[in-house]
Amino acid sequence: MKARRPSAVGGASGERLRSSMALAAENPGAAARRARLLPFVVLLLSLALAGCAGRPGPEVLNEVAAAAPGARQVTVYVATTRQRSSPDANVFTAGRAEDVSYAEFTISIPPGHKPGNIEWPGVMPDPGSAFVTVRQRVLDKLAFEAEVSRKRNDRRPDVGVFVHGYNVNFQEAVFRMAQMVADSNVNGVPVVFAWPSEGRESGYIADKDAVTSSRDQLVALLKALAHDPGVGNITLVGHSMGAWLTAEALRQLRLTDENATIRRLQVVLAAPDIDVDVFREQLAVIGPLTPPMMLLVSPDDAALSLSRFVADDHGRLGGVDVRDPRAAEAARKADVQVIDISNLEATDAFRHNRFVQFATLYPKLAANASSGQGGDLRRSGVYVFDAVAATLSSPSAFAGKAIAGE
């Protein structure tokens, strides 16, 4: 069986997808624009370097015996292509491993936790005010699969797989997953696919290579989950550069006739750091998904602006402007759902992590949608997310409300 290449995405509609998202290719004025942007880029990188001076080290994953009244515990499972520092330790480096390693972490969320934030522990971890690790285990593949598919409340567990982005170290990925699970009150099983990001701003090119080297391993993980009769629904979320890896894994699954695996997946690409032409080619192979692939975008995402600069002015998918009239037609033809989440509060200076707040509000959005209020999560097209009401609206309708002061 040959991979599907739906006509809705290729040919003329593929051109619409490329043009509608205003992600321009090189043009005579690009060099001049890059020259004007260079001081801005240097400033942003300087701010990022200053802001990341105190990033968490592997010590935050050391077990803390104390407990705090009112704290919530979240267990996160990990499949990683990072090198393990030793066979019996859950300390992982930025080195690239040939085989996948597995681990389990139980993270305690402090009672005063603010949604969207990670309250990092200090030198003396205090579970009353910070995220702390209360339990961890080294797992092998069989133990990992058994734990992920283990019944909860006599029901098959739903599984959420999170593929992190560029400039993320191992412990940041684990704690971010714990934070999103706690804030969204998800009852499923959270799995982090941790590829070997350098975890530093200057490692962009190295991360591009590292994320590519992890493609086969992500494919294998998705196949194992999808073919496990003990697993329920599977949600796959790729953020930033991890969105590129996610799309590549889907493409490889389609090319190898793993259509049954793809049918099990609900896919979200958050702030996707993907060249629009590359995405067009990926989507031509992947084909339409049910429900439609969801793209979370923000035209003011400064991190993607930097990526565009590095990519010689080739625009990024996560910077789509849904208010461009051509975007609606392109999304419909490509059978994807594009949601502008710019109205959400950013948790980082680059406005690149808004998906964290979206994850917190998603259960409310889903409840509103199921009751017939605030948009259809199973319909392709372009939408703006209303952070106050947790609903979706068309860009024109949202703009009308803004003008009317509603």
Image (spheres, rainbow, N blue to C red):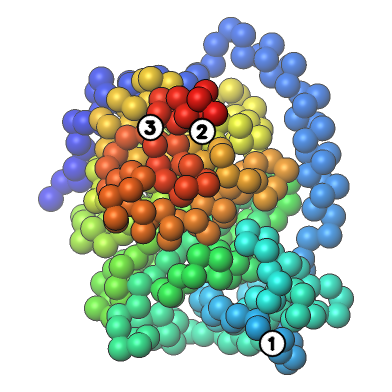
Q: Give the residue drawn at x 46%, y 49%.
A: 390
Report how far apart the C-alphas of labels 1 and 3 lie in the structure.
44 Å
Q: Is residue 304 above or below residue 63?
A: above
Cβ–Cβ under 8 Å for marks 2 and 1: no
Q: Amino acid at mark 1?
A: Pro
Q: Which mark is residue 406?
A: 2
- Of mark 1 and mark 3, the one earlier in the sequence is 1
Q: Is residue 35 left or right of residue 18?
A: right
Camera-side residue: 287 or 206?
Answer: 287
SS class of the residue under badge 1?
loop
Kindly identify which residue carries mark 1: 69
Number of numbered discs:
3
Q: Position of residue 206 (x, y in %)?
A: 64, 48
Q: Give the residue drawn at x 20%, y 36%.
A: 6
Q: Amino acid at mark 2?
A: Glu
Q: Is residue 321 visible?
A: no
Q: Which mark is residue 147?
A: none
- Of mark 3 and mark 2, the one earlier in the sequence is 3
**Which dot, 3 or 2, sits closer to the camera?**
2
Camera-side residue: 129 or 255?
Answer: 129
Q: Which mark is residue 394?
A: 3
Residue sticking out furthest to the left:
1
Camera-side residue: 186 or 404?
Answer: 404
SS class of the residue under badge 3?
loop
Q: Give the residue drawn at x 41%, y 53%.
A: 365
Report how far apart the C-alphas of labels 3 and 2 lie in the structure.
15 Å
Q: Residues within 10 Å of mark 1 (few under 14, many from 20)?
A: few
